[in-house]
Image: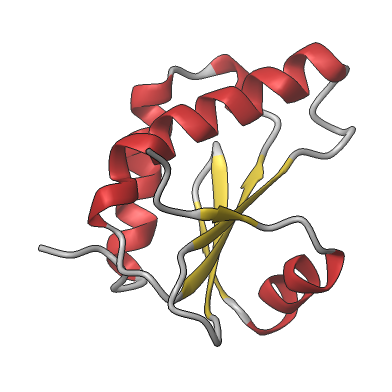
Amino acid sequence: MRDYLTIKENFRFQRAYKRGKSYVSPALVTYVIRNNTNNLQIGITTSKKIGKAVQRNRCRRIIRAAFSELAPQIISGYDVVFVARAKTSYVKSTEILSAMKNHLQQANVLQN
């Protein structure tokens, strides 16, 4: 069962980009901002710079797979936006998982 919601509204993405704290690695950028609800909400962004639809969908799949392993450990009440980078489609989900875990630990949203 999924214990998080998906961000679909553009204003939530914009809020994360403008006011959220960002964490950067070569394959992934993570934005974290507190939300007004008690839900964990995630969004995944892949731009056309990454490649055609096949590469963009692969990036989203890799990010979603890595996030599903960490989701039970994340504190609810946050919006988390992941932005794929050009390198994302060429790395394995374990590499994305370690970058994601590092970003979320820096943001203090992972439970011990």
Instruction: Please tell me which residue is depicted at 86% across the width and 33% down the height of the picture.
Output: 49
Residue farthest toward the top in the current orientation of the protein: 54
Instruction: Please tell me which residue is depicted at 70% across the width and 30% down the height of the picture.
Output: 86
Q: Quadrant of the C terminus?
A: bottom left
> In the image, residue 100 lies at what x, y percent?
40, 46
Q: Quadrant of the N terminus?
A: top left
Identify the image's colour scheme: rainbow, by chain, secondary structure or one colour: secondary structure
> In the image, residue 26 lies at what x, y percent?
54, 40
Question: Which residue occupies the foreground of this view, 86 or 59?
Answer: 59
Q: Is residue 47 left or right of residue 59?
A: right
Above/below status of 28 relative to 24:
above
For the image, the number of numbered tags is 0
Image quarter of residue 98: top left
Residue farthest toward the left in the current orientation of the protein: 112
Q: Is residue 74 left or right of residue 92?
A: left
Image quarter of residue 45: top right
Instruction: Please tell me which residue is depicted at 83% across the width and 39% down the height of the picture.
Output: 47
Q: Is residue 111 left or right of residue 74?
A: left
Above/below status of 58 relative to 108:
above
Instruction: Please tell me which residue is depicted at 51% across the width and 81% down the height of the picture.
Output: 37
Above/below status of 62 relative to 4:
above
